[in-house]
Amino acid sequence: MGTELLNAIEQVHREKNIEPEVLITAIEDALIAASKKIFKSDEDFGAKFNRTTGDIEVWAIKVVVDEVENPRKEISLEEASLYYEGVEVGYEIEFQRDTTKLGRIAAHTAKQVILQKVRDAEKRNVFLEYSDRIGKVVMATVRRRERGDVILELDDGTECVMKKDEQSRSDYYKANDRIRVVIVKVDENSKDPQVKVSRSSGILLMRLFEMEVPEIYDQTVMLKNAAREAGDRSKIAVFSNDPDVDPIGACVGIGGQRVKSIIRELKGEKLDIVRYSDDIATYTANALSPAKINRVIVVDPFTKELEVIVDQDQYSIAIGKRGQNVRLASKLTGWSLVVKTEEQKLEEVTEQMSRMAEDSSRERAAIESELEETVEEKLLVEEDLLEEDVEESTETMEEDGVPIDFLEGLSEEHKQILEAYDIRFIEDLLYTDRDVLMQIPELVNDINGIIELAEAYAAQFSDEEEA
């Protein structure tokens, strides 16, 4: 087995450009795993492939310890000293295993490892070769169908796959057919063919124009974007860097030869060539061709929403069959489009004006109602304050007495004299001893008359109570 394995490794190295060391390391790792199964042990194994003879060596590894807890992975210092001199705790001791038990398993393991490494290397090579070719158009030969997918073969023998959603409805694929496809993805770790191709991508349409139109190749005419519903209809946006060159005319060609060649490649797919503009309203109007657009309104520039206004007879043309025209135009421009007739827009504006008028009336009524409530609240507050003032005044009178101001017939001079002696209320005159009041020198001759005024005032309320 040794010589055969060495020859196999060398052959793989030459043909697949895989380094021998990579294969040998993988074989050794696989032999370690196989040894655990063959010897039915959880020991730590090591393996070595002799690069000269091709022989295989397998051994068990044990660690030198003071006290053995796991005899399958550990060995005591005393026992290790019987095999080797000068060993210390922590050393690893190798015990050779009989490789005759491996036999065919070792050969099978090596074969499987080599095959797996070859597959991995081939996948890596395919990835490196085609990852830089994403977006490129290539020729491929149809080989077979698998669950709706189409398996193809590129010119260098590499298999590629065209998923169901990447196929065109107008195409019919037969074995050995030669078709153009565009590479859209390369997957390094895929179990399916790594190279993914498409016949429905807008990139294919753009690449076909690049192949057919020289002005695109020399960048006089530029392709901006493409939108497709493969097998039915497509739109492509173009513009010119040279004002003397018509981009649409350049793409159509004399007698339509250039565009006809592309349509044949796409099996009769309808094609609209649209003039690109930096002004989104103009660009959108062009994208909705062949419909005639009255105006385009930007509804929200942040969410990219537009309203497109057309006459009634252009509405169905702008929408297209099953909404296809407006759907493709939306994909092409990258904006969300809502198509409306002039009548629909007028009705919408009228409704908005009515709602605004109603809202204004309701707002005015609410303001008037709020003002009325504010005025009423203010009046109520003022009434409450007035009542509180009256109540406070009444309470003050009830607590302190009736001011002498209420005595009819009391002169201003006598009033000032009484207040000078701190006699401010009628009750002071009624309940203060008469002899005390007689001591006021300025009122010696008049005090009795003043007291009589006070008694007369008090008598009024006594009569009311008796009544």
Image: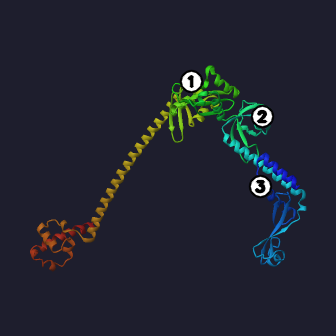
Q: CA distance from mark 2 to mark 1?
A: 46 Å
For label 3, count other residues whose C-alpha is less than 10 Å away and answer few (under 14), some (14-19) or many (20+): few
Secondary-structure class at tag 1: helix
Quadrant containing the C terminus in the rendered view = bottom left
Q: Earlier in the sequence, mark 2 or mark 1?
A: 2
Q: In which quadrant of the rendered image does the N terminus lie? A: bottom right
Q: Which mark is residue 21?
A: 3
Q: Nearer the viewer, mark 3 or mark 1?
A: 3
Q: Residue at x 84, y 55 (%)?
A: 109
Q: What residue is shown with label 1?
A: 313
Q: Quadrant of residue 127?
A: top right
Query: Which is closer to the viewer, label 3 or label 2?
Result: 3
The location of residue 58, given as percent across then percent down, is 84, 63
- Report the residue marked by disc 2: 142
Vertical arrangement, residue 287 with respect to residue 128, above or below: above
Q: What's the amino acid at mark 1?
A: Asp
Q: Residues within 10 Å of mark 2 (few under 14, many from 20)?
A: many
